[in-house]
Amino acid sequence: MNTTIRALLGATALTATAFAATAASHENTTLTIATVNNGDMIRMQGLADNFTEETGIELEWVTLEENVLRQRVTQDIATNGGQFDVMTIGTYEVPIWGAQDWLVSLNDLPAEYDVDDLLPAIRGGLTVDGELYAAPFYGESSMVMYRTDLMEAAGMEMPEAPTWDFIAEAAAAMTDKSNEVYGICLRGKAGWGENMAFLSAMGNSFGARWFDMDWNPQFDTPEWEATLTTYLDLMNNYGPPGASSNGFNENLALFQQGKCGMWIDATVAASFVTNPEDSTVADKVGFALAPDNGLGKRGNWLWAWSLAVPAGSDSPDAAKEFIAWATSKEYTALVAENEGWANVPPGTRTSLYENPEYQKVPFAEMTLQSINAADPTNPTVDEVPYTGVQFVAIPEFQSIGTAVGQTFSSALAGQTSAEDALTQAQALTEREMKRAGYIE
């Protein structure tokens, strides 16, 4: 990291004086940043004027829906297109792209950035052969978010670590379709990072695997049949209409409107469902670990939305400067000052969970427990040749996972049966794995 950036960051804080000292050198610099359209990223854009004022670096935002973002940044980086200086990418892309030398190493971030403060599980997923290739903006697992008032009215009490059987029982008890209250909301929108993120993690808790140790697809097994049929039963009986079109943002809106008894999704959603400015049920939300089936694995994932510099950027030093600002302890403090500790980006730094103020946040401990419960190196009940909890860390997974997600979304929409969906998933995955040379 050059001395200018070291001076910018200072000994303990990103001071306005230090930033101003280098503003002149950046007065003609504009960074194009590709990011996802979720709440934390929108909040970052709202606070980014602070960065521009202090550094002189202008920012242009390309804000996209999750599936579209992945398509755009993948196409750009694979062709070295140079459209973006900073990309918002996930734990799936970082190790694959880093190994291809498609990303700029961040190992030269200054000591003041305190990379050792990053949670080991999150940092490990962003590191290849000792090189940090992305800085986590926020980390997440998944957990159960539920209406405490509806649970109480049903005469039930949510365990800290529920089973899938309990979830089904509670969903039935809380469903009141005549009043548009649905016992459970789950992702149905097709995509390897949408419905398949949920279903892959759910499958782990049922003993399902994407592949055996010889890379043979496993959708023709009883474990996947149990996973998919349980999911479809929950959604068809107790879920909202049109669920095959619902991803994270759609279910967030439903929950905030009071239409979901339970929602199993990203831990990062906790700050949004408990924000009284946006959520009609903000004071009636409880949290629990993702469900299990007593097999030793819970149905929760591990993910980080991170900021990375593509090798094609014309302004890598300025891009690193922005990343250091946006993922710093000081940015966390800026969010806390403006919007409260409950709204800071979670799941990235040990120091956050040691902070007495953050420990008062009702979902902080459950988020950390959920992150620590996920093991990407040992994600399934039976042994597998891959890493990744809700994805398989091979380049081919992006297309295969989305194709399987489309098949399962069709089953949720009633266009095909669970049996036929699993047969299609097995056939298409076998075909692609043969084409890629994993199996004969």
Image (tube, rainbow, N blue to C red):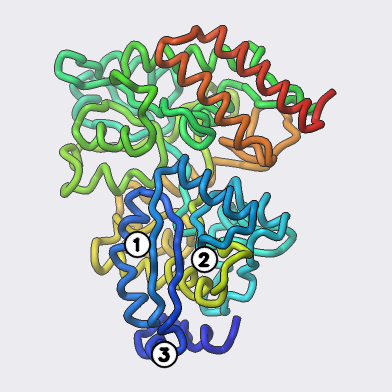
Q: Position of residue 43 (x, y in %)?
A: 31, 58
Front-lying residue, 364 or 234: 234
Q: Amino acid at mark 2?
A: Asp
Q: In the rendered image, which residue does mark 3 sit on? A: 24
| Element type at mark 1 | helix
Q: Position of residue 387 (x, y in %)?
A: 68, 40
Q: Taking 25 as reference, is 357 left or right? A: left
Q: Name the quadrant containing residue 347.
A: bottom left
Q: Position of residue 136 (x, y in %)?
A: 51, 59
Q: Name the residue located 67 percent from the left edge and 23 percent from the top edge.
A: 429
How many residues crowd around disc 3 within 10 Å: few (fewer than 14), some, or many (20 or more)?
A: few
Q: Taking 273 as reference, is 110 left or right? A: right
Circle 2/circle 3 CB separation < 8 Å: no
Q: In the rendered image, which residue does mark 1 sit on? A: 44
Q: Amino acid at mark 3?
A: Ala
Height in image: 334 above or below 302? below
Q: CA distance from mark 3 to mark 1?
A: 24 Å
Q: Earlier in the sequence, mark 1 or mark 2?
A: 1
